[in-house]
Image: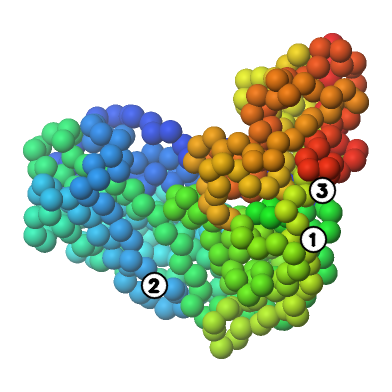
């Protein structure tokens, strides 16, 4: 039942990791005045490379005097619209951009098609083959003429985009922009990246959603925890066969979306941050500032003429509900090893996993552990270490770990605020095999049966 919620550092697979910049072959604004190579928007699905790969100097978005913005309206399937890409910098004299459109449910898939014109060049795939692309990934960028149009300090590129002819759910746009100094070299230019998600303005064709269960995402225990990661199970949440998680574009805003693929979750009438939406399951985060009795609703196409809302489902929000995430389909706790990256698991459970050894420092992941200091609102990305206000204790193999061997207990940094991390040193006296693992907090215990594999 439980699936670990990923972080920007790539904890698991719910979010796409932000890829480091790669610096490759030399170039200049002059050299790419007819358009940059393909795959330069910074999208992780294309390798995470942006225009700094060729325009040497500061990292993307480093100069706060400039920016790039994407202006795209909600789409109607098959109806062409104009997408505007604005690049600004007070000192820039010449301009460039690249824009892509992808399915939010799978960002390696092309969404719709761009139309070349006097301002816009379109190439296809990683090798930048000529347009038309016939379903391959499309990269829209400036033409040579477009780089010198407009006044100094700001340039607006207009790109014609035809959405897919049918409802494909949310669409993600990524863009990179070059605010260039027209110096004829590859230094001194300012590179900016951005992304945005647009929705089907007509909504999804859905029956009325129904809720069967609301429970803790880690343990499956009924009801919700304050700021806790929570799952809803039922039917008609999204079109059959379609599911998606929060995208890199959405979490770049340092908060998770409150609508995903036509779906909104209301807790006591207020939208909640969503991390995953499928036809029979939604994962979301419970509110930060509400306790006790609560109602939960799933609303499809909220605010549109074809809105469909489930019946209100009665639940409870508790101050604490400690629960350990496990690797999917197993009782093996979701944990990382001493290097901070290797999964603590048998290789048969997780590819590349390794059991822990007595005395190892491991990181385990949980939800339902209450408020931290500083506190983060639901949907926020925890941007720095934030210890628990109510401490926990840890038992491994029936042995209580000394408090001095719990090195950190708090929000998982660079993850959604309802995900908690506990760094604990395993007792030296542990025996080999799958040892029980329990955390206790405020008189409550995490779910029974969770284990951690130990080797001598």
The residue mark sitting in front, 2 or 1, is 1
Q: Eyeballing the image, is 419 above or below 148?
A: above
Q: Quickly name the residue at label 1.
A: 223
N-terminal of the pair, mark 2 or mark 3, is 2
Side of 423 relative to 78 (left or right): right
Q: CA distance from mark 2 to mark 1?
A: 37 Å
Q: Quickly name the residue at label 2.
A: 73
Label number found at residue 210: none
Label number found at residue 219: 3
Q: Eyeballing the image, is 419 above or below 348?
A: below
Q: Is residue 328 visible?
A: no
Q: Is residue 175 visible?
A: yes
Q: Identify the residue at horizontal 87%, vertical 22% (top origin).
A: 399
Q: Identify the residue at horizontal 25%, vertical 66% (top origin).
A: 158
Asked whether the beta carbons under mark 3 and mark 1 sit within 8 Å of each other, the answer is no
Q: Quadrant of the C terminus?
A: top right
Disc 2, SS? loop
Q: Quadrant of residue 385?
A: top right
């Amino acid at each position: 039942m439980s699936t670990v919620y990923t972080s920007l550092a790539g904890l698991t697979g719910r979010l796409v990791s932000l890829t480091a910049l790669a610096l490759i072959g030399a170039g200049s604004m002059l050299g790419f005045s007819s358009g940059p190579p393909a795959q330069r928007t910074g999208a992780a699905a294309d390798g995470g490379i942006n225009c700094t790969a060729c325009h040497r100097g500061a990292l993307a978005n480093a100069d706060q005097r400039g920016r790039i913005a994407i202006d795209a309206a909600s789409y109607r399937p098959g109806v062409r619209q104009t997408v505007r890409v604005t690049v600004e910098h007070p000192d820039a004299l010449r301009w460039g951009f690249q824009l892509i459109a992808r399915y939010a449910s799978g960002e390696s898939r092309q969404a719709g098609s761009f139309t070349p014109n006097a301002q816009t060049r379109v190439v296809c795939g990683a090798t930048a083959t000529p347009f038309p692309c016939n379903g391959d990934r499309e990269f829209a960028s400036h033409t040579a003429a477009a780089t010198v149009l407009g006044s100094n300090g700001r340039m607006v590129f207009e790109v014609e985009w035809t959405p897919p002819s049918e409802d494909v759910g949310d669409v993600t746009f990524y863009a990179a922009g070059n605010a260039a100094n027209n110096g004829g070299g590859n230094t001194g230019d300012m590179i900016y990246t951005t992304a945005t998600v647009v929705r089907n303005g007509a909504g999804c064709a859905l029956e009325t959603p129904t809720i069967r269960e609301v429970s803790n995402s880690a343990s499956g225990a009924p009801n919700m925890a304050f700021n806790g990661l929570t799952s809803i199970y039922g039917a008609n949440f999204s079109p059959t066969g379609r599911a998606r998680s929060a995208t890199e574009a959405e979490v770049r805003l340092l908060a998770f979306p409150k609508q995903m693929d036509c779906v909104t979750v209301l807790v006591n009438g207020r939208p909640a941050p969503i991390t995953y939406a499928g036809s029979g399951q939604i994962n979301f985060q419970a509110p930060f500032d509400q306790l006790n009795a609560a109602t939960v609703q799933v609303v499809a196409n909220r605010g549109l003429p074809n809105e469909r809302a489930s019946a209100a489902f009665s639940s409870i929000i508790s101050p604490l509900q400690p629960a350990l995430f496990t690797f999917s389909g197993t009782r093996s706790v979701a944990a990382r090893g001493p290097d901070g990256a290797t999964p603590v698991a048998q290789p048969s459970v997780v590819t590349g996993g390794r059991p822990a050894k007595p005395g190892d420092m491991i990181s385990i992941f949980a939800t339902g552990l209450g408020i931290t200091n500083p506190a983060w609102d639901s949907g926020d990305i925890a941007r720095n270490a934030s210890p628990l206000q109510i401490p926990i204790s840890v038992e491994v193999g029936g042995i209580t770990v000394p408090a001095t061997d719990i090195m950190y207990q708090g929000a998982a940094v660079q993850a959604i605020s309802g995900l908690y991390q506990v760094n604990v040193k395993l007792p030296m006296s542990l025996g080999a095999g799958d040892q029980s693992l329990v955390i206790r907090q405020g008189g409550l215990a995490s779910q029974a049966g969770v284990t951690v594999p130990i080797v001598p």
